[in-house]
Amino acid sequence: MKKTKAELTELLKKISIVFFDIFAVNLAYAAGAIVLEPYQITKTLKTLFGTMPGSLIRIVILTTAYLFVFKLFGIYKNIWKYAGLYEMVQIVLASVMGGIVNIGAEKIAIYFEIRGISNRSSLFYINTTLFLIFIIGGSRLIVREMARKEKFEVFPGRTNKKNVMIVGAGIMGMIVASDLQANSYRFGSPVVMVDDNINKQGKRVRGIPIRGGCENIPELAKEYKIDEIILCVPSAPAERQVEILKIAMKTGCTLKRSPSLLEMREEDIGIRQIRDVEITDLLSRPEVKLDTEVCGYLKNVTLLVTGGGGSIGSELCRQAALYSPKRIIIFDNYENNAFELQNQLQRAYPDGPEVIIRIGSVQDTARLKEVFEEFRPGVVFHAAAHKHVPLMEESPCEAIKNNIFGTLNTAKTAMEYGAKKFILLSTDKAVNPANVMGATKRVTEKIIQYMDSHTTGTHFAAVRFGNVLGSNGSVIPIFKEQIKQGGPVTVTDAAITRYFMTIPEAAQLVVQAGGLSQGGEVFVLDMGEPVKILTMAENLIRLSGLTPYVDIDIEFVGLRPGEKLYEELALSEEMETRKRTANDRIYVTLPTAMDEEEFLQTLKKLKTADADNARKLLKIIVPNFKENNGCGPEGTTPTA
């Protein structure tokens, strides 16, 4: 069969490599002898190879033995532009074995008194092997570097080399540097490293100089014309990592980071796990990893998640799936997100829980009863709610119908059908609320308290969140879109602060609260110090490789109706009963006293109230609801 041009090229390459190895073997053989007698080169070579036909016999034996061993070790099957430690070890072992085979062949030749073959010293064979490793291995490494350099320079879309700084000269830094080099530098060329360990400074890792500590990042970034900085210190304390990132942000370079020790997957360590630095990496506290031992209550149960297709509801389903429930029911009135989540869970857990979607609204009691009758869930996570503060100010009755009566409908149905646990997702905006949304969520907390005091079969509890980073409609996606559009980024007030948590933290808090709950409690995560929204906006701009107030402007639009400068995590009366749980990162507050008769009567009136009466009735149930009419212009974009 006629060979293609590519096949002929590959064949010629293989033949060239074999001929080079024949030359290298004989060159190493000669060099090994010359080193022993450097001043008698001619005599040495004549003694070594002898005269015809002894010299031909020696060359044939020598080269045949080495080529046979090289083929046996798979040397000719390697792709040398990807060569690494494994291939170098192959060459070393093959060269040593080739020397041993040659010694044996030579002994046999001497035994049969073949002309021109004589004994050689042990030092001769050692020298020959070392030279052979140097010539064969060195030539392959040269080929590898030339191939990588050529591939990098012609890589599609890459006209300029991207210079990379690696922060951290430990194991992870070495892995990332090695991976960048092994991938032909197409993801960037590591040109400098920094490390706070002074014993490493001034040395090299894989040929890359370690020039100083993290405080030198800005000046070294200028000196080496750095385009990208990769943080590779997964074992460093979270606070120190934040400090390093803030130093690196001053350079204007693209920032990336290696996975944390918990995120690392042994089978996939390297550049495939390098990710962009996110705003969550700049939280003033480490992300909270909650204790999962109390989550055994989910094993083999049917779990219903209302609002299961939303950003938090979907993460709840993912987190819960880790604890082997029998089935997960996604209940949502928007089918697209629910369908995508179902596919994700089925791919991630092919042998895991059965994932079922039911479309419906928590405002529809009849539909709720159909779903509870069909599946009889043992645990309910109630995430369905209207949460946008400015929108709910304009539509208070919708907030009341969905948040208050949707919760009441779901809680009553859960109790009627014997659910063991019911966990409500609440918000820090329910504490001394200044808006309708917060007031409605405070009412839902009271509903949970009331329901728990009138049942023995279902444990009702609530979980109070801060702002959830990255959730639908939250500040981060809005800022990112504004930056993408070229600005300006709109912030309500320079002094406004918020408590923040990540979506996984929020979901873990709910899942864990289900295990800790004894009934009627409100659980709150210790979220550290509140974060200034202005600082977050500035950091997001910097993470986009831009400069605040230069490339992207920031405008202050004033507080809108319903917004507060700061949020609180607990009511004053709750502080008396507030205590830490078995997990010292979670607080729990016990139910507060309320007039149940007045509560029920006011709820009854709320059901038919118009927008004007709704606010008055909310203030009866929630006396500390003090509306903030805001001072910002109408129609501005929500930012927090």
Image: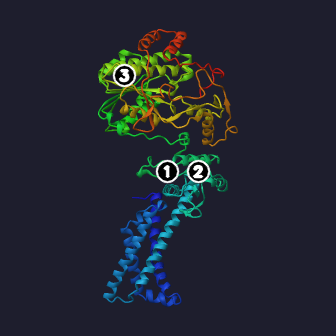
Badge 2: few (under 14), some or many (20 or more) residues near its Cα, within 10 Å? many
Q: Quadrant of the N terminus?
A: bottom left
Q: Nearer the viewer, residue 306 or 43?
A: 306
User: Of the residues under marks 3 and 2, which one precedes in the sequence?
Assistant: 2
> What element does badge 2 sit on?
strand
Q: Residues within 10 Å of mark 3 (few under 14, many from 20)?
A: many
Give the x, y percent position of residue 587. Answer: 45, 33
Indicate which disc residue 452 carries: 3
The residue closer to the viewer here, 54 or 623, is 623
Per the model, the C-alpha gap separating discs 1 and 2 is: 15 Å
Of badges 1 and 3, the one in the foreground is 3
Which residue is disc 2 drawn over?
229
Sequence-earlier tag: 1 or 3? 1
Q: x, y (%) of residue 350?
A: 33, 38
Say if mark 3 contacts mark 2, CB within 8 Å.
no
User: What is the distance, in whole Å, between disc 3 and disc 2 at their CAs?
Assistant: 53 Å
Q: Is residue 285 visible?
A: yes
The amino acid type of the residue labelled 2 equals Ile
Query: Label 1 vs label 3: CA separation?
Result: 44 Å
Q: Is residue 617 placed above or below 87 in the rendered structure?
A: above
Q: Which residue is mark 1?
A: 234
Give the x, y percent position of residue 282: 56, 42
